[in-house]
Amino acid sequence: MKKIPALLALLLACCGVVRPQSFDLTNGRLPVSSLDGLWRFHTGDNPGWDNPSFDDSQWPLLRSGKGWSSQGYPGYAGMAWYRFKVQAPSGLNHLTLLLPHIYTNYEVYADGQEIGSYGKMPPDPVAYGGWSFQTYSLPPGKASSRQIEIAIRVWHWQGWAKQHSGGPESYALIGDSSVIQTLYDSAQGQQLFSYTNTIILSLLQTFAAIAVFMLFLLRRAEREYLYFSLILAFSAAHGWALLWFWSQPSPVAFMSTVQVVPGLLCVGLAQLAFYRQLLKARRSPFYWASFTCLLAGIAYVLLVNSSLLSAPVNSYQFSLVVFLAILPNSLWILSLLFLRARQNMEDARLLLLPVLLQTSASLFQNAAIITFSAGWQHRLSYDIPLISHPFTISIEQAGNLLFLLAVFAILILRFTRTRSQEERFAAEVQAARKVQRYLIPEHLPPTPGLAIESVYRPSREVGGDFFQVLPNLTDGSTLIVVGDVAGKGMEAGMLATLIVGGIRTAASFTTEPLRILSLLNERMQGRGLATCVALHIERDGSATLANAGHLPPYLNGQEMAMEGALPLGSVSGIPFPVLRFKLAEGDALMLMTDGVAEAQNAEGHLFGFERIAEMLRKGVAATALATAAQEFGQEDDITVLTVRSVAACA
C-alpha cells in the first residue's frame, strides 16, 4: 500500500510526461502513459469543479505522486479537488484510469461525468481503507484524437490527518484498457506475495488451533488446551481479517473493530485464562485489573466504531487507548512467568524467553503505531520489518511465531506426560482391581445348610463395597460380613481391601460379630468411614447379627428391626447393636449396600426402599434385584447377598 509495484515503476520510466497537468498518449512506447507530473489542486468543494470548461488556471500545481501535506497543506483534512488533462490519440477508444490509494475517499470524473468512486463521500462520509489500486473505465471515444478532462474530488478523514497526507500515495496510469487490466492483475499478485508472511502465520495458527482443540477434546479436564486454541483462533482471525481488508475496500470502523477486538483484546482475555490455568495462578487484584482493562478496551472500540461518539476520535487517541487496554495484561503475564520461573516451574521456564520476546515486540510495535499516529515520527509505523526478502516478516510476527512454536511444543510434551501418567495410573488401577477381586470372591465357598447367592457390581474400576463369606469347617458355622466404604474410586477401593484383610485376620481367632466389628472400628480410626454388618449363622440356624450403621437385612422380604449405630471409624470404643434370631428351613435373608436404594434415573428419581420391598415380596433373587437397580441408573457400588436355609439344622 505504501510502495508502487515494480512493474508499474518500470512503466513510469518508459511513459512520456509532457507539460504540467496535460498528459499525452500519442508518443508513448506502449498505449499507456504515466500521470506522474503536476496536477491542479484546490481545497474546498464546489459541484462545478467537475465541469471540463471550468477555468482552473489559477489553481496551484502539486506533484501527483505525493500527498498535499508535504506540498504546503500540512494536516489539512476535508474536501479538495485535483484536475488534469489527458490527450488520447485516435484509435484508442477504450481507456482505463489506474489510480493509486488516495486518502481517504474520492470520486472520479471524466469530462464532467462520474466514472467511479471509492468510499462514502459527504454529506455522510464513511472513511474507507483497503486495496491500494483501483481502475476506472473512461467513456468510449471517437475515432479521432481527443482531450479528456479528469477531475478527482477527495475527502480526507480528520482521524488520519496527522499521520497520513491527503491525496494520492503514488503515481497513476492511464491507457488501453487491456494493458491497464494486465498491470492491475500484476499489481494484485505482487501485493498478495508481499502478504505471504501473514498468510503463512495465519495458516499455522489456524491448523494449530484445530490441533490443540482436538487435544482438548481428549483431555477436557485440562482447560489450558481450550484457552490456547482460543488464542490461536483469535490470532488467526485477525490475520485473515487483515488479508481481507488489504484485498478490497472496507470501512475503516469495521476494519479496526474486526482487527483490534479479536486480534488484541480477545486474544488478551484468552491469554489471561490460559496462563492462569497453565501456571496455577490465583485471581489477584492485578489479574482483575487486567481483565477489566481488556473489557473496557472492547467496549471502547465498539463504541467508537459504532459512531456513538459525537466527536471524531483520531488514530492517535484510538491507538493509545488500545495500547493502555492491553498493557496490564502483558505485564501480568510477564510477572507471573518470572514468579513461576523463580519457583522452578518447568513450563514457566520454557515459556519465559519466547513470551518475553513476543510481548516486547508487540509493545514496541504498538508504541511505534502510537508515535506514528501522533505524527512524532514517520520511519516506523504499522509493520516493523525484521527481514525484507523474499517477503517481509515483521518483528511482531516473528515473536508470535516463536511463541506459537514454544507453547505448542510445551502442550505436546504435557499431553505426552499426562498420557504416560494415565497409563501408569490405569495399570495401578488394574492391579488394585485384581487384588480386590482376589479378596472379594467371585465364587463362594461351600456352606453346608445354606444357599448363598452374591452379586457385586462396582460403579468404577475399583469399588468401595466389600463382603466376605467364611465357613468354619470345624463346627459347620458361617461368618458373613457385608459393608460399604464412604467415598468412591481408588481410595475407597483400597480402604475396602484393608477392611477385608482385617476381617480375615479377625476371623482367624473369633467368629463373634460384635468383636469383629469392634476390632475393625479400632483399625479404621483416622482412615475413613465404613458401614458394615457382620452375621454369624451356626449349624442349627441360630444367627447373631451386629450392625455398624449399615442397612438392616430383609428376612423373608421384611426389613428386620435394628437399632441405629455409627459407622466404623467414627468413634473409638463405641458399642454396636446386636440382634439374635434363628433361621428356619426355607427362610431367606437378604443383605445389600445402599447402592441399590440410591440408584437414580435420568429424571432424578431414586430406586428407593419401597421398590426394594415390593420386589422382595415377589421373591426376586439377588441377581434380579441388582440388575434392576443397575438398569434404573447406578450411582454407587451395588452389592446384594441372599442367604437361604436349605436344610433342617440338627
Image (spheres, rainbow, N blue to C red):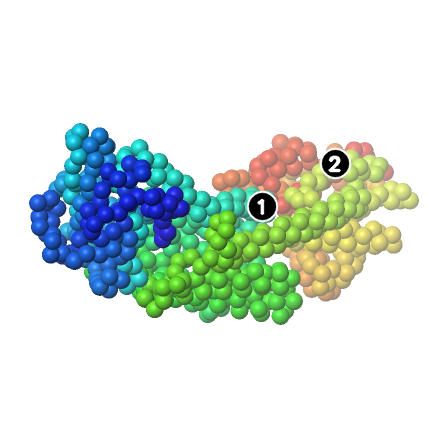
Circle 1 — which element? helix
Q: Which residue is mark 1?
A: 215
Tell me residue 438's x, y (percent).
80, 44
374 horizontally vs 620: left or right: left
Query: For residue 281, which quarter of the picture?
Result: bottom right
Which quarter shows the C terminus? top right
Q: Earlier in the sequence, mark 1 or mark 2?
A: 1
Residue 265 vertical placement versus 622 (above, below): below
Task: Determine contact: label 1, label 2, CB under 8 Å.
Answer: no
Front tag of 1 and 2: 1
Tell me residue 119's x, y (percent).
24, 47
Circle 2 — which element? strand
Q: Is residue 562 visible?
A: no
Q: Amino acid at mark 2?
A: Glu
37 or 159: which is nearer to us?
37
3 horizontally vs 106: left or right: right
Q: Which residue is mark 2?
A: 453
Q: Amino acid at mark 1?
A: Leu
Given the current orientation, which residue lies at the most extreme right position? 474
Query: For residue 371, which quarter of the picture?
Result: bottom left
Given the current orientation, which residue lies at the most extreme front position? 27
Which numbered tag is attached to residue 72?
Answer: none
265 horizontally vs 501: left or right: left
Tell me residue 361's x, y (percent).
48, 62
Residue at figure coordinates x 66%, y 44% from the top left: 460
643 or 12: which is nearer to us?
12
Mark 2, residues whose alpha carbon is within 10 Å: few (<14), some, or many (≥20)?
some
Residue 286 vertical placement versus 46 (above, below): below
